[in-house]
Image (cartoon, rainbow, N blue to C red):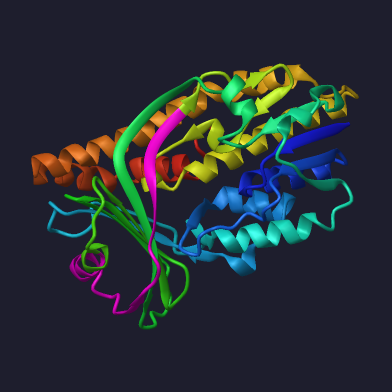
Amino acid sequence: MKVCIIGDGLVSLILAKVLAIKALSVDICCSNKLKKYSQTRTIGITKSNINYLNRNVLNIEKILWEIKKIKIYTENFKKGEILNFSNLNEQTFSIIKNEYLYDALRKNLVRNKFVKFNKTKNLKKIDKKNYNLIINCDLNNIITKKFFSKKIKKNYFSFAYTTIINHKRIIKNNIASQIFTNKGPIAFLPISNTQTSVVYSLKVENQKFDNDIKSLIFKFNPKYQITKIGAISKFELNSSNLRNYYKDNILAFGDLLHKVHPLAGQGFNMSLRDIICLSRLIDERLDLGLALDATICHDFEKEIKDKNLIFSTGIDFIYEFFNFESKTNNELISKSLSILGKNKIFNSFFKKLADSGLRI
């Protein structure tokens, strides 16, 4: 059986490896240019998804940085963090540079006998009759425009600025921080004892980004003694959920299915959970000796679509909640949440939700 994956991003490559392990022939259709990720971009991966990747895709322990505690602050609340998620015995989640993960996956796949990279610009040449399943992970191509243009969209009218700061060595730099400032949320995500990734979401483009970063680090994270601020990248923030997941035997996937605000670090993790779901559905068919066809697209949409929409809406609610808190400048909201966060049941529920999504 043969599968075509359109796109060569992180989700595409992970999906290709998962399918290749099942001895399915996989064609990865991509552009002639080798994909390049910004050196400032990082992703957070939950504990359960790391375990899945290590067992089923590629051992990534050597290229990730473990986070054992997450502290959440608001600028209006002056009495420390309002939420604290920790697991002192093992990682809560881990941070990895996009480029490191991409390079590791690509090097692994070029040696895989079941995977073939087809460099092409003309997707019209792809005949769906030649494949049992076509998985489209590309946001901008002729197939997307023709079949997958209807979305539930939201524009945050914001930009996410990303950079990596070098700082004096911190032993066990494994505490991530999210601060909801009056200018927008800022996240500090350690990637080594001397480097921390920063993601700062702003409503408008800010020409004094370096100074804002320094002042916020000084204000909320006095442990960081910066020696250098790296190159700054930015991307526009919006969210979307695709209305239809498939057309015949063509299945939409990755960011094409759903995009969410980066404040919770869940976009990539949602796609990994989608891969786990699709992999299980494929296994069920292969175990029964059935071929892959359009019915698997239908079953995938039926099982995952509503969960993805609910989860995406939940992330947007978190953004709007803290956005409202910053606008009202009311400490009472943060104080109430701080009290609630100390409840063990509440804390445990949200850790499981962040780790496993709605499939807990």
Q: Is residue 349 left or right of residue 215?
A: right
Q: Is residue 1 left or right of residue 136?
A: right
Q: Is 259 or 287 nearer to us in this picture?
A: 259
Q: Is 2 or 140 nearer to us in this picture?
A: 140
Residue in the picture at 74% in, 21% down: 249
Q: Does residue 82 appear in this view?
A: yes
Provide residue 356's location: percent of width, then percent of height.
Answer: 53, 41
Q: Quadrant of residue 25?
A: top right
Q: Quadrant of the N terminus?
A: top right
Magenta span contains residue 224: yes
Q: Is residue 224 left or right of residue 299?
A: left
Provide residue 99's location: percent of width, then percent of height.
Answer: 58, 61
Please determine whether, in this image, residue 349 is positioned above or below residue 191: above
Residue in the picture at 50% in, 64% down: 39
Please determine whether, in this image, residue 139 is positioned above or below residue 296: below
Q: Does residue 59 appear in this view?
A: no
Magenta span contains residue 245: no
Residue range corresponding to the magenta coloring: 213-240
Residue found at the very far front of the displayed protein: 122
Q: Is residue 132 left or right of residue 323?
A: right
Provide residue 208's location: percent of width, then percent of height.
Answer: 22, 63
